Amino acid sequence: MAARIDHAVTSGTFSLDGQTFDVDNNVWVVGDDDECVVIDAPHDADAIRAVVGDRRLKAILCTHAHDDHVRVAPALREATGAPILLHPDDKPVWELTHPDLLWDADLTDGQQVEVAGTTLTVLHTPGHAPGAVCFHAPDLGCVFTGDTLFQGGPGATGRSFSDEDLIKQSIRARLFALPADTVVHTGHGDDTTIGAEAAALG
Ligand SMILES: [Zn+2]
């Protein structure tokens, strides 16, 4: 059975540098009827578990460690036994939200995560956060970009741990190298494509 993508949106807050904002976050679940992985764990573990259903959750993959992406990762781990995977360069960001907890395994550039007969390749794309990663699924014709690339351009770089030049460098070198018709599933808001964003950013 081929892997498929399921999706939920959760609502809550994002806090950094002493400010708090209301945000809606995308949760992406890649798998088949037997097993799956979750990409990001914002706000509401029950909402995420509703998408997972009775499938075996193999891993909780974090695109980066802003609190609106990892808030309920430990609760989801507790409930399912699935390990949390994060790029270690996001340790200082993770510690703002979970100072007394750790993730289980590091994500590394080029790493391949296997689920339901398909492969997600980790692309380290620092800039929005130092440990920001994207997950490319060539079989599914898509890439999960977290807050690195949105419909309309690069993710925000105005706050701590961010770097505008670096995010543009990451996007150009790593994401725009993907086929133009690759669908971009983002951390917030609507899908786009690599080709549309490459044309817009120039
Ligand atoms: Zn973020």
Image (cartoon, rainbow, N blue to C red):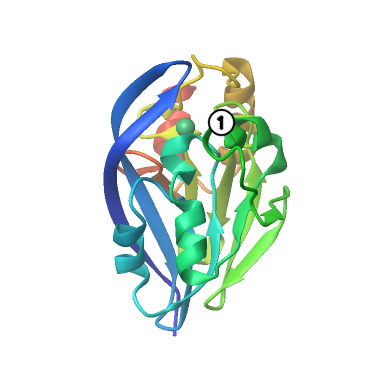
**Residue 189 visible in rendering:** no
As drawn, is 65 to the left or to the right of 8?
right
Q: Residue 127 location, x and y as percent?
A: 60, 26
Residue shown at 62% from the left, 42% from the top: 100
Residue shown at 39% from the left, 82% from the top: 33
**Residue 157 visible in rendering:** yes
Is 52 situated above or below 18?
A: below
Tell me where residue 4 sits by quadrant: bottom left
Within-10-Å neighbours for mark 1: few <14, some 14–19, many 20+: some
As drawn, is 87 to the left or to the right of 60?
right
Of 155 and 161, nearer the camera is 161
Is 28 situated above or below 161?
A: below
Q: Residue 52 location, x and y as percent?
A: 37, 70
Q: Residue 92 location, x and y as percent?
A: 65, 30
Tell me where residue 129 sits by quadrant: top right
Ligand 1 within 8 Å, label 1 CB:
no
Q: In which quarter of the image is the N terminus?
A: bottom left
Q: Residue 153 location, x and y as percent?
A: 42, 27
Residue type, numbered disc 1:
Leu
Is 80 situated above or below 150?
A: below
As drawn, is 133 to the left or to the right of 40?
right
How many numbered marks have been drawn onto this rendered protein structure?
Answer: 1
Residue shown at 60% from the left, 21% from the top: 161
Dot 1: what SS?
helix
Residue shown at 46% from the left, 50% from the top: 40
Q: Which residue is the site of mark 1? A: 96
